[in-house]
Image: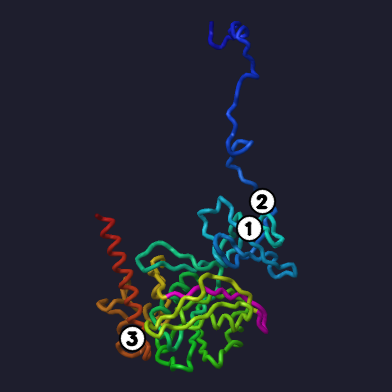
Amino acid sequence: MSWLEPDDDDDDLGFDEADIRMRPNPKANRPRTKRRPAHADARIARVLGVDRGRYSILIDEDTPEEHEVVAMRARELRKQAIVTGDRARVVGDTTGDEGTLARIIGIEERTSLLRRSADDTDQVERVIVANADQMLVVVAAADPEPRARLVDRYLIAALDAGIRPLLVVTKTDIADPTDFLAHFEGIDLEVFTSARSEMPLARIGAALVGHSTVFVGHSGVGKSTLVNALVPSAHRATGHVNEVTGRGRHTSSSTVSLRYHGRGGSGWVIDTPGVRSFGLGHIDPANILAAFTDLAEVGEECPRGCTHLPDAPDCAIVEAVAEGRLGPGGPARLDSLQRLLLTFADKADREARSGGA
């Protein structure tokens, strides 16, 4: 008898189809599937900030129905970075009523992404903000002392992200910023100076209209004070500089988007926590020279493959600075450029040796 043929003896045992038992699905009543809903009804929202896994988002931006909603990320986005400034696709309860929770199911394509690393050798990127088109670098003329090389790093990160940089020097009633600003002569950089008794709010505000501007700066330089003056409803915490270390206290602990309303229109102010370092481990070294616009222009006369380092033969930049053709700030800018280039040259050297080991 073939094993496919029924055995008459089975009937004698009293078995039929009803006796077959199926193991229940322990997680659902339906089998799992990789198909996901299309979410054709998803709405687009601006991410204003994040706090312990909950996202504050703005629905119906620039309409009379504009309102804030709290949202969580969908499970399929658990490996996707969602940052302030992102344009998110949202489903679920978007009324914004107390106790409701929407769900972020996707991120729209970003126009820019500002990043930093822990140091220049760290390949892990820390995403700061998405879709910003301006960076306002805030430094103090004193208390704490301004650091030109930190500003250089901000400028390089902005250029790499395709973001226009601006510079505000605060506390000019304490110290004269002339020598510090000489470092940036010849660079295409709009500069504002501000004293505690007189902030150029109208001029800075005019530059913010129609833009999404990320504010960055060392702790204690007065960044949060400036944000509060521009956006009175912000209520960002302000701190002071430690008299022993000369360092500012971290007061802003998270990145947040705030609406700016000015005479000429509105814009977005994105306040970030103060930092004491700004690693460029993720930056393309080719963009470093481009951040020093006056040096880059002279560098077009350099021989092909010129490193622009002190021992580089026939370097047009080194010669121009030695001859004083780039003004009093030329030597400091060249020194800053060469330090950054050396850092990345050493990094490339280490990577080449480890790759060949």
Q: Is residue 308 above or below residue 184?
A: above
Q: Which mark is residue 225?
A: none
Asked whether the residues under the numbered discs 2 and 1 touch, taking CB atoms below 8 Å apart as contact, a structural biologist would say yes
> How much space separates mark 2 and mark 3, taking CA atoms?
58 Å
| Residue marked by disc 2 | 39
Decide whether residue 268 is among the magenta residues.
yes
- Relative side of 356 to 156, left or right: left
Report crowding for label 2: few under 14, some 14 to 19, many 20 or more residues within 10 A (C-alpha): few
Report if residue 188 is visible in the image.
no
Q: Amino acid at mark 2?
A: His
**What residue is drawn where x is 53% and y is 70%?**
255
Label 2 element class? loop
Q: Which mark is residue 89?
A: 1
Q: Is residue 278 above or below residue 202?
A: above
Q: Which residues are magenta?
A: 261-275
Marker count (numbered): 3
Report if residue 143 is visible in the image.
yes
Mark 1 vs mark 3, foreground winner is: 1
Splitting the image into 4 quarters, where does residue 70 fall? bottom right
**What residue is drawn where x is 48% and y is 73%?**
158
> How much space separates mark 1 and mark 3, taking CA atoms?
49 Å
- Relative side of 207 to 174, left or right: right
| Residue marked by disc 3 | 331
Residue 208 in picture, x, y percent from top left: 59, 80
Splitting the image into 4 quarters, where does residue 325 fall? bottom left
Residue 66 in picture, x, y percent from top left: 71, 68
Report crowding for label 1: few under 14, some 14 to 19, many 20 or more residues within 10 A (C-alpha): some
Residue 181 in picture, x, y percent from top left: 43, 88
